[in-house]
Amino acid sequence: MPTNKLWIEHTERAAWQSVQALREKLTEAEQRAERMAPPVEGWQKLFDALDTARESHALSGETYAELIRAALDRLARAEVERRSLEARPSSEPQRVPAEIRPLPARRPRRDEGSAWNTLSEIETRLADLPDLDPTEIAEIAADLAALARRLRPGSDLDDDD
């Protein structure tokens, strides 16, 4: 039976390429397994670091997997915020966060002026909303909630009592 020398060379070359590809995949799999399973003495250091991160960064999660997921979620949010800040044109001046003004001292409920002052503060803060970025809007929303709470449902501004 005649054999073609070129066919034999092609077959050998294909076989060696397959062997090389399998060796590379095996090496990658071994490296990944090593990264996923640190040595036994490394586990305690890893758990200690996760416990420290839980306390210092106020991360939530009962298991270490949940703790890692919370850290990764926070990292992803920070990355999105960083990208949005970088996307701003450099010619645009940096915005100073909205000044948080302390609420005036609480006045008696029947004080008509107090309700009107509160409404005036709410109107002022609502007027600032279109010029703010999303992080500043969250601060203003918290201020508005506190002001709205001072109004208390059931108090009538038109009462002359």
Image: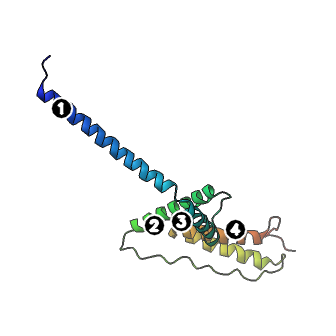
> Where does label 4 land, which residue?
145
Give the numbered dot on residue 10: 1
Which one is nearer the viewer's eye here, 104 or 8? Answer: 8
Figure quadrant of residue 69: bottom right
Q: Give the class, few, some or many, for how many residues have Cα within 10 Å of label 4's Cα (few <14, many ≥20).
A: few
- Disc on the earlier residue, 2 or 3: 2
Q: Is residue 103 placed above or below 34 in the rendered structure?
A: below
> Where does label 3 land, which residue?
134
Which amino acid lies under the numbered mark 1 shown in the image of this protein? Answer: His
Which amino acid lies under the numbered mark 4 shown in the image of this protein? Answer: Ala
Which amino acid lies under the numbered mark 2 shown in the image of this protein? Answer: Arg
* Side of 39 where 117 appears, left or right: right
Q: Which callout, 4 or 2, points to the residue nearer the camera?
A: 2
Figure quadrant of residue 110: bottom right
Q: Residue at x 37, y 49 (%)?
A: 27
Q: Residue at x 71, y 71 (%)?
A: 146
Q: CA distance from mark 4 to mark 1?
A: 76 Å
> Where does label 2 land, which residue?
82
Horizontal and vertical percent for residue 24?
Answer: 33, 46
Q: Is residue 31 placed above or below 118 in the rendered structure?
A: above
